[in-house]
Amino acid sequence: MQNEDELRILAAAAIDDDGEYCLLREWNKQWGGEHTDMKSLEDCGFMKIKSAGRDPLTKQWFRRSVITDAGRVAFAAVKQ
C-alpha cells in the first residue's frame, strides 16, 4: 500500500499525456520528501526514471520519471 503522497505522484503521472512526473530542486538545496516518495515508487516498479540532471539556465536540478504499467494498475486498484 502506497502512502498518500506517493498516490498523488501516481495520480499526476497517470493523467499526464506522457505519463511523466518531474521534480525540481533549487540550487544548493536538498531534495525533499517528494524525492523520497518518487524513489520509493521507482523501487516498487511503479515509476521508472526517464532523465535527471541540471538545467544550465536556472541551475535547478530535476528528476523526471514515467509511470509504468504496474503503476497504472496499482493506481487503478486504489482508485476504486
Image (cartoon, rainbow, N blue to C red):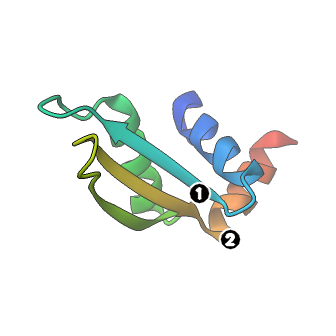
Q: Residue at x 18, y 31 (%)?
A: 30
**What amino acid does circle 2 point to?**
Asp
Residue 46 appears anywhere in the view? no
Residue 65 location (% of width, % of height): 48, 59
Of tags 2 and 1, the one toward the viewer is 1
Q: Amino acid at mark 1?
A: Glu
Q: x and y percent of residue 57 in the render?
A: 27, 46
Q: Earlier in the sequence, mark 2 or mark 1?
A: 1
Q: Residue furthest right?
A: 80
Q: Residue at x 25, y 32 (%)?
A: 26
Look at mark 2 in the image and give the residue it sits on.
69
Q: CA distance from mark 2 to mark 1?
A: 13 Å
Q: Going by the image, does 38 lie left or right of 68?
A: left
Q: In the displayed structure, does residue 31 sit left or right of residue 49?
A: left
* x then y, percent, for residue 38: 43, 47
**Residue that numbered label 1 is attached to:** 20
